[in-house]
Amino acid sequence: MSYRWALSIPGVILACYVLAALVAPLVSPQNPYDLLQIFGWEASYPPGSIGSGGYRYLLGTDGLGRDIVSGILYGLRISLVVSLTSASIAAFIGVTAGVAAAYFGKWADAIIMRLVDLQLSLPTMLVALIAIVTLGPGIDRIILALIIVQWAMYARVARGVALSETGKSYMDAARLMKLPSSRIILRHLLPNSIAPVITLLPIEIGHAIALEATLSFLGLGVPIDEPSLGSMVANGFQYLLTGQYWISLFPGLALFGLIASINFVGENIRSDFDPRSSSI
């Protein structure tokens, strides 16, 4: 398997996003959510303006005087942490459920897959809205809501692959040796069923970022004192009609670039794991 995705343009862009999020506290001109570092009289400064402290606001300030560059860097941290955490936990839960459904079959398969079918039959945003309204605001609750939204897709993919593996000779040999079910699943079935899930993970991370941004835009996402790219776009939306486009535009472009780079990297990873897809 090649790793050309890591050296591709989307891979380099994604690496820059991750690096910017990691070093945000070191390179940001201000903490945009620390009231002691914000000057209210510098609200809605256009890009390139110079503040009272001599600092040039490269992308301007928002309606409260917060630096847009700093807001984007800090917002990347929240968006990436929420999406990576939720997608990873959802993958673990979904793969475990899907493999268990394929291996045990019968009532286990019926119960798990009916839950999966029920959730996937509903619009994703509707499930997310119901979950977040029920759980309430907060980063931890956003993560939990995204886990609820995403686990079913992993379960369906993992079950499909695991079903094709359960009938193979190595599985029959393991059963004839009377190995414990836990060992058969962990040592044999799960490793041979994980590849499609790895290709799905980057796509679902991008999906989680988009969902978090949408919920934050609707005012149901992360709290106002915790920056995210979605909440920054929402905060600037009310200023669009007054011509202060930069408050929403630049965070929106950063959000678009992040999701696009993750999706392109995910597609390249899928091509590496499935060479047949490169010829389509």
Image (cartoon, grey):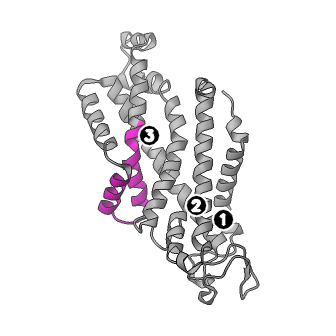
Q: Tell me: 193 left or right of 262.
A: left
Q: Amino acid at mark 2?
A: Arg
Q: Give the x, y percent position of residue 112.
A: 29, 35
Q: Amino acid at mark 1?
A: Ala
Seen at 31% across and 42% down, the residue is 121
Which residue is disc 2 drawn over? Answer: 77
Q: Is residue 242 above or below residue 254?
A: below
Which residue is disc 1 drawn over? Answer: 24
- Is the stretch drawn in magenta largely helix, strand or loop? helix
Seen at 62% across and 86% down, the residue is 39
Seen at 53% across and 56% down, the residue is 81
N-terminal-most mark, 1 or 3: 1
Indicate which disc residue 92 carries.
Answer: 3
Q: Are marks 1 and 2 in contact (CB under 8 Å)?
A: yes
Q: Is residue 208 above or below residue 39?
A: above
Observer-nearest of 8 and 84: 8
In the image, the segment drawn in magenta is 125-154
> Is residue 81 within the magenta segment?
no
Q: Is residue 234 above or below residue 119?
A: below
> Is residue 134 within the magenta segment?
yes
Q: CA–CA distance between discs 2 and 3?
A: 23 Å
| Name of the residue lying farthest toward the left | 107
Q: Amino acid at mark 3?
A: Phe
